[in-house]
Each structure stands twice: as C-alpha cells, then as structure tokens.
Amino acid sequence: MFVIGLTGGIGSGKSTVASIFANLGIEVINADQLARDAVEPGSPTLATIAERYGGLYFAGRWLSQ
C-alpha cells in the first residue's frame, strides 16, 4: 500500500489532484474536513476546548480561526 500526502499553498492544485485520485477509485482522506467535523458545535472536542480555554477561542458557538 502507498500513502501519498498532498501538500501545498492555496491554489496549488491539492483539491484537483484529490478529485482525480477519487475519480480513479483511490481512497482520499481530507484532513481539513476531519478537523472541521471534530470541532463542530456540540462535539466532545469543542466541549473540551471550551472547558480548557474558556471563551478565549470562540466567536459565538463556533471555534474562532
């Protein structure tokens, strides 16, 4: 099994290459989406961040980037 990491700056083609891989039947894991899912409102991860850091990193109910 091969593991390929796609890295690069904004507009470098990461999403395009990931789409090509997916169309070829290659499994693609989107780390950005996994991170967004982990901190969505109501998630245990978000609750832990709020518990440890209070409102320091929040804009309303969302984690502030």
Image (spheres, rainbow, N blue to C red):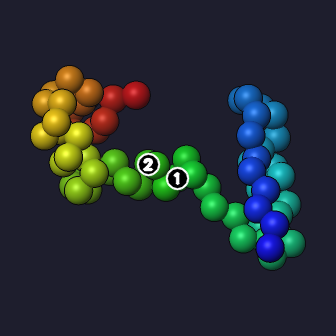
Q: Horizontally, is 37 left or right of 16 in the view? A: left
Inspect the image, locate mark 2, and give the three-letter code of the amino acid beneath it. Arg
Closest to the observer, 61 or 28: 28
Q: Quadrant of residue 7?
A: top right
Secondary structure under badge 1? helix
Q: Name above or below for residue 7 compared with residue 20.
A: above
The residue at the far top in this view is 56
Badge 2 is on which residue?
36
Inspect the image, locate mark 1, and give the three-letter code of the amino acid beneath it. Gln
Residue sitting at x 57%, y 52%: 31
Where does the image place residue 30, in percent across and percent down from the top left? 61, 55
Report the disc number at residue 33: 1
Where does the image place residue 18, in percent across and percent down from the top left? 77, 56
Q: Horizontally, is 54 left or right of 37 in the view? A: left
Closest to the observer, 29 or 11: 29
On the question of residue 19 being in view, the answer is no
